[in-house]
Amino acid sequence: MQARFASERVCFATMAEVGRSCRGAASSLESERMLKPRRAVWLAMAVVHSLPGGGDELPPVAAFAALPDVEGITISPTGRYLTASIRQGERAAFQIITVAEREMKVNVALGDKREVTEVVWLTDEVALFQQSWRVMGTDYKVPTGALSTVHAETGFVQPAGGGSVIDILPDRPDHILVHIPENRFGIAYRLDIRTRYPRQVARSAAPFGTFVTDANGDILITVGQSNDNRQQIHTRPAPRKRWRLVASFGMEDAAWLPVRFGPRPNTYYTLDSRGGGTEGLGVYDSATKAHEMIIRHPTVDVTTLLIDPAARDVYGVRFDHHYPQIAYTDPSHPLAGQHFGLTKMFAGDTVQLVSATRDRRLAIALVTGDRRPGDYFLVNTESKKVELLKSRKPQLKPESLSRTSPIELQVRDGTTIYGYVTSSPKAEKPGPMVVYVHGGPHGMRDYWGYDDTVQLLASRGFHVLQVNFRGSGGYGVDYERAGFGEWGRRMQDDVTDATRWAVQNDIADPSRICIFGASYGAYSAMMGTIREPGLYRCALGMYGIYDLTLMQKQGDISRTLAGEKFIRRILRADENDLIATSPLHQAHRIGAQVMLVHGGLDERTPPEHATRLRKALIRSGNEPEWLFDRQQGHGFLGDAARVDLFQRMLAFFQEHTRGGNPPSSTKDGNPAAAS
C-alpha cells in the first residue's frame, strides 16, 4: 500500500493535532485505513499514576544540568520482568525488577563512566546488555565492545563476547548476530552466547561496511564506502554467495539506503531521496531490483521508523515538520492501534513504544514533549490501564517549563526556513532573547521537544530562538547542500533574518539579544557579531570552531582521508575565503561582549581554536570571559561542571541583556540559584 500526504488527499495528523478533525482528507477506505488503525477501546484507559504538580518556584539550575534518572526501560517477552538503566547521582546501574511484585532481582553497579545503552531479551529470563562509555574529549557515548548476559531469577551475569548487535535470531535464542570492524571492513559473526564462540557469516564488500538482515536473520545486503568516497550497496542471493554491486552514489548524490527488512520476502525498507528532494520511505525488491516509494513528506526527511520490538517489523514512520508526525504503514498492526490510542491520551506530546511482550499484552511507552523531559509508562491492554513507572527528570514539572512553538519565515532571497521559539508565558514581550544555534551543522537540526538549555533560559525569562538554517539536515538534500560553501555567508544570513523576524514580531527587544552555540554553533555566534555589528549585545561560544584554516589540519575529522574530503566539500573555499570567514582572523571586528568555553581534551575542535581567539580578542581590546577546563572535552561532563557552566552562562546573558530577569523569583530570591 502506498501512503500519501494531504496534498494527495490523505490527512496527516501531527502529535500536537491528535484528536482534532483532519480537514480536506480523502474519504476513501484506503485513506481511512492508513490513518486510523484499530483503536482497541483506548479512550477508556486510565492513567493510574499521574504526574506530580508543581508550584510557582523556578526549578534550580541543577535540575537542568543533571543527567536523566533513567535512560531506558524494557519488558521481558512474557511480561514478568522489567529492566531499567538508572542513574543515582552520577553513578549508573542496571536493574531487573518483577512487574507484579516490583521486587528487585538484579542490581549491577556500573560506576560513573559506563551505562547500559542496549538491552535485548534472548529468552523469557535471559537478557543481553551492552555497555557504553563516554569517550574522553567528546560529548558522545560509544559501545565498550563487551556484551553480557544476565539471568533475571538468579542474577548471574556472565560475559557473552564482543561486538555491536546487528540482530537477534528468534529461532536460535542462544545466538545473536554481531558486527566487528576489522581492517576497515565490517565482519558479521554469529555469536554463541553460551560458549562465546563467534562464527563468521559475512564480510562487507566495501570498507566501513554495515549489514542489514532479512526477516530470517540472513545477511544478504551490505552498505559500505569505496576508496573514492562513494557509498556502495552490494547484495547476494544467499549466504556464502558472492557479493554483487547494485548501486553506487557520490556523497552529494540523491541516493537510497537499505535500513530494515521489508514487508515481503526479498524486500528491504529504504530511505530514498531520489527524485523528490526529501528522503522518503521506500521498498527495494532484491530479486527484481524494483523500487517502490511508500511515503514521502514534501518538506522533511524521515526521522525514524516505528518498529515492533518483538516481531522486529515496521508498522509506521515519523516525520518532524514543525511537530512530530506519524504515518502508519501497517494500520492493522496491533502496535499501530496501541500507538494511535496513546497519542490521543497524551495529545500534544510524543509517544514511542520502546518495548513490548511477545503477545503485545504489555508494552513500555516513552512519552516526551516540549514540557515533558520523558516519562516511562507500563501499558496494559487487558486492564486498559497506563501506569507511570519512572520519569527521566522528576524534579522538573510541566507547569514550570515553557511551550516551544514552531516558526517558518521567508528570508531575504525568498527561501522558506524553519525553526522554533520557546518563551515563558510570563516573559516580557518584547524582551531579552537568546539565539541558540545548533551544531553540526550538516546533517543536524533542531527538533520540537524538551531541551535542557532551552528550558533553563526560558525559565529565567529569555525568549529562545532556534533556527534550522540552510545547510541543516532533515529538510532534504537540496536544503542541506544549499549550505555547502556558505559558512559565514548564506547560513549566517538565515540566522540573522530569523533574529530580525523575532524583533519585527515583538518577541525580541532589539537592544537585548545575545547569540550562542556549541561547535559550529559557536562559530556562528562569533560570525553573527562580525557580519551584523550592533545586532547582538553578547556572544557565547562553547567548544567552537574559530579558524577554518586550522579545521582542515587539526581535529579528529581531518585525521582520515574521508574526513579531509568531507571538510573540503562543505567549505568549498580557498585560503583567502577561509580567512575572510574565520572569527579568529576577523576578531578585530567583534564588538559584542564574548564568553569562550572550551575543554583541554577536545579532539573535535582542539583547544587552539579557543586559545588563539582569546589572544586575538585581547589584542583588539575586547577581552572575553574565559572558562577553560583541562579535563573536559567536546562537551562538559559531570553534574558539578555542568551546573557551574549553566550558572556562568546565565550570569553572562543576564549581565549583557541588562538583567534578563525572570518573571518570578526563586525561593531564595536569586533567579540564577542552583540549589
Image: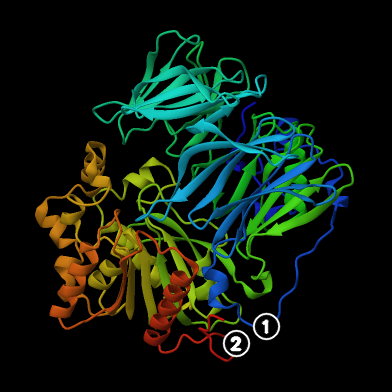
Which is more toward the observer, 45 or 558?
A: 558
Residue 406 position, x and y percent, is 54, 61
Rendered residue at 45%/64% (across/down): 466
The answer to whether residue 510 is seen in the rendering is: no
Q: Quadrant of the N terminus?
A: top right
Residue 162 position, x and y percent, is 48, 32
Residue 312 position, x and y percent, is 64, 30
Using the image, determine if residue 478 lies above or below residue 441.
above
Using the image, determine if residue 171 lies above or below residue 586.
above
The answer to whether residue 245 is seen in the rendering is: yes
Q: Is residue 162 left or right of residue 208?
A: right
Per the image, the residue denoted by label 2 is: 664
Name the amino acid, label 2. Answer: Ser
What colouring style does the render use? rainbow
| Label 2 crowd bin: few (<14), some (14–19), many (20+), radius 10 Å | some
Q: Answer with the quarter of the image where residue 532 lies.
A: bottom left
Mark 1 and mark 2 residues within 8 Å of each other at the beta carbon: yes
Per the image, the residue denoted by label 1 is: 56
